[in-house]
């Protein structure tokens, strides 16, 4: 997979993004820094990602952050990496290890935003600032970057309504939300409900344990049994991995040609969009998010201000006015694959249009 173009969007990400979602304009906020002694380029950045089932973390987030840290530190910065594999206890232990190893800053994508709080406080007590990445971790975090998660849910809901058209009230939809331990999942769900409530009939709704496709598959089988396959007209799926499990259950029940949403623009999801099995995904420009996280982490490790990077503020349940950057998202359908994931260098046409998908790619002009 080529990533030659991946850094393009992010190079300018000392961003001037407008405040969105829950962000509040920072105005003339005071300077934000780690408060420690200033360091040079030989810094150590701890990177903790939540799981390895969703393709994005190992294929995009980790290498992008590592690359940007190297760029910002003239090749002298080191990224120490660990993946919690969806276990909050493991992630808390990984924070302890990072503290023992005396990293200068932590970037943490929390498995469980509440369960990580005590570890964030431990890091703070050890003089290590924490950048909350993608999910708004609780505790005394120093910075946060993610996407406008409520808008993600709205984009998904709007796409589902568009796909349903006049059939929106002709049957039931199923809502497959993410894990209750992920604060983003609650925001996706809230955004989707803002759009869908009153315009569709929600037959069944699930919060899917650990975002796992197999759990979404089991939930979908239950929904089909409860509602009857002839009564289901569409499915809201909060991400692409779950969409895969959902579509497997739909196919097994003989249900085809109903819209299913997604998120993350995973390769398998994009390929399902090409074939028409999945209606849409939400493309979130990982290069921008990863670059911002690296910029924040390096600045904090070096004792520098975040004012030129983070123009907005957000409030977590435990910490107010956290310096933040929220990155815009795009609704990805078969009509704009070239203008999104291909243009940004996430995938090539050959990545998507393998032999199995070549005919479907040809039909939509993806050549």
Image (spheres, rainbow, N blue to C red):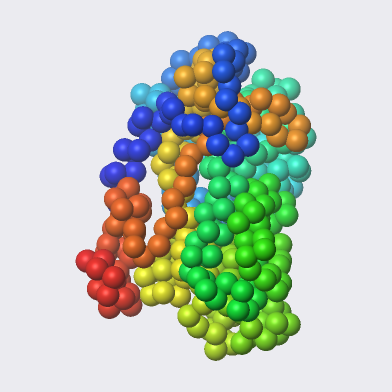
Residue farthest along the left direction in this orientation: 367
Estimate the x, y position of residue 111 in percent, counting from the top left.
67, 48
Seen at 66% across and 57% down, the residue is: 193
Q: Quadrant of the N terminus?
A: bottom left
Estimate the x, y position of residue 146 in percent, counting from the top left.
55, 40
96 w.r.t. 90: above or below: above
In the image, 203: left or right of 105?
right
Estimate the x, y position of residue 110 in percent, counting from the top left.
65, 44
82 w.r.t. 25: above or below: below
Residue farthest along the top direction in this orientation: 37
Residue 287 visible in the snapshot: yes
355 w.r.t. 294: above or below: below
Residue 78 visible in the snapshot: no
In the image, 52: left or right of 290?
right
Estimate the x, y position of residue 213 in percent, counting from the top left.
60, 68
Seen at 51% across and 77% down, the residue is: 258
């Amino acid at each position: 997979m080529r990533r030659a173009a991946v850094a393009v969007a992010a190079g300018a990400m000392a961003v001037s993004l407008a405040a969105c979602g829950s962000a509040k304009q920072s105005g003339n906020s005071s300077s934000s820094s780690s408060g420690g002694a200033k360091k040079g380029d030989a810094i150590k950045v701890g990177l903790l990602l939540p799981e390895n089932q969703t393709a994005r973390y190992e294929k995009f987030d980790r290498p992008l952050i590592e690359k940007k840290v190297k760029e910002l530190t003239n090749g002298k910065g080191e990224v120490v990496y660990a993946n919690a594999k969806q276990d909050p206890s493991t992630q808390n232990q990984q924070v302890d290890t990072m503290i023992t190893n005396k990293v200068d800053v932590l970037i943490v994508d929390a498995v469980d935003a509440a369960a990580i709080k005590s570890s964030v406080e431990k890091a703070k007590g050890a003089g290590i600032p924490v950048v909350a990445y993608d999910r708004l971790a609780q505790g005394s975090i120093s910075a946060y970057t993610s996407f406008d998660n409520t808008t993600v849910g709205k984009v998904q809901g709007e796409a589902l309504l568009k796909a349903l058209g006049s059939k929106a009230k002709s049957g039931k939809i199923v809502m497959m939300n993410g894990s209750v331990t992920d604060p983003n999942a609650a925001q996706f769900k809230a955004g989707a409900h803002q759009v869908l409530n009153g315009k569709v009939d929600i037959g069944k709704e699930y919060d899917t344990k650990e975002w796992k496709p197999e759990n979404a598959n089991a939930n979908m089988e239950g929904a089909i049994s409860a509602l009857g396959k002839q009564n289901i007209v569409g499915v809201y799926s909060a991400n692409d991995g779950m969409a895969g499990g959902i579509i497997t259950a739909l196919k097994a029940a003989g249900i085809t040609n109903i819209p299913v949403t997604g998120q993350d623009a995973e390769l398998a999801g994009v390929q399902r969009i090409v074939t028409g099995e999945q209606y849409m995904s939400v493309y979130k420009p990982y290069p921008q998010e990863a670059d911002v996280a690296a910029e924040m982490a390096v600045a904090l490790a070096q004792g520098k201000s975040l004012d030129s990077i983070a123009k907005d503020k957000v409030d977590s349940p435990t910490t107010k006015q956290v310096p933040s950057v929220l990155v815009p998202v795009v609704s990805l359908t078969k009509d704009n694959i070239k203008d999104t994931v291909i243009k940004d260098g996430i995938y090539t046409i050959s990545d998507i249009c393998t032999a199995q998908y070549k005919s479907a790619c040809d039909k939509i002009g993806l050549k």
